[in-house]
Image (cartoon, rainbow, N blue to C red):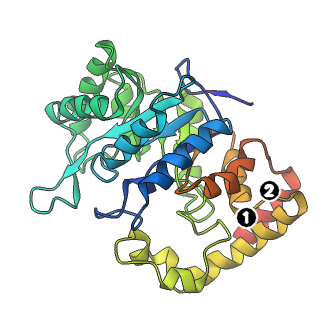
Amino acid sequence: MEQRKLGNSDLAITPMGFGAWAIGGGDWRFGWGDQDDAESIAAIRRAVELGINWIDTAAVYGFGHSEEMVRKALDGMTDRPYLFTKCGLVPSATDSRVPTENISAASIRRECEASLKRLAVEAIDLYQIHWPTDNIEDIDEAWAAMAELQRAGKVRYIGVSNFNVAELERALAIAPVTSLQPQYSLVKPEVEGEILPFCKQRGIGTIVYSPMGAGLLTGAMTRERAKALPANDWRASNPEFQEPKLTQNLELVALLEKIGARHGRSAGEIAIAWTLHNPAVTAAIVGARSPRQVEGNIGALTFRLSEEEYAEIARRRRR
């Protein structure tokens, strides 16, 4: 199984990791609707069984529920995957279902201790700040706190998520940044312009999230399904799942299905492979809510697009 070094770390990770956002359930602002916990546990175990060696979760996913599901799934497992989690989003004082940014040193330390307890580990393999605040100066205190957690052995490596170049530079002035986790897909390619080249130049690993556009590019999303998304699924209010963007996105899916048919691959696997084609991308986070979904995307561990196929997709994007 191919493995790639993540940034400045000694972590050798598979090109695809298990994303545990959706298994946090639907009882919070950015949930994915109701989720069966037994299916979540089975999905994680199936992913590890098929060769995935890292799991990405966050304290905010169901406000601890996702981390608890990860712990239960790995209970008793001898060959355990790396565990990546995040801090910096906590329940709002006015609505406990809605997260708000808090990257103060005290909050980060509290979140780290809570995550260690929920995951039942002595150290987190990669600890990440989930989102920056509107005040770039907050990074100074936050990143110093993250570096202190690393020195204390609470976390092995530290990274960030959703940072821009200026924010990355601010953090780098304080301590090394192992990785960045940006959103990156055919429907959200903006980081190609500045952020991914910066990370490649500075040796920062990148683990991209939502490579299938939050389910849009899997081949399973239809107009009918998009319209029927439940109220507790954050995608129900996302413009990408509504017209006129929905039709454009489904036309793109048709091309991915056409390319996938040549290789016996799903549209989702082609979408993931597209992100991995970028030399700045270390690996992709792929969410799953059941063993069946894991099995439907596992081909992306090994499948790669040819240059001709990548160009074919590029021509469609330019229309």
- Residue to which mark 1 is pinned: 267
In percent of width and height, residue 115 lies at 29, 34
Q: Mark 2 sits on what residue?
A: 310
**Is residue 69 rendered to the left or right of residue 91?**
right
Calculate the distance from the C-alpha at mark 1 to the C-alpha at mark 2: 14 Å
Q: Which numbered disc, 1 or 2, marks the residue that appears first in the sequence?
A: 1
> Mark 2 is on which residue type?
Tyr
The residue lying at 20 percent from left, 29 percent from top is 109
* Residue 234 picture location, percent across and down: 38, 69
Q: Which residue is drawn at 52% across and 57% down?
A: 289
Q: Is residue 28 above or below residue 182?
A: below
Q: Which quadrant, please, contains the C terminus?
A: bottom right
Image quadrant occupied by the N terminus: top right
- Viewer-side residue, 16 vs 195: 16
In-image side of 218 versus 166 (left or right): right
Q: Which mark is residue 178?
A: none
The residue nearer to you, when weighing 127 against 64, is 64
Q: Which amino acid does label 1 sit on?
A: Ala
Residue closer to the observer: 82 or 171: 82
Tell me where residue 31 appears, x and y as whole percent: 36, 62
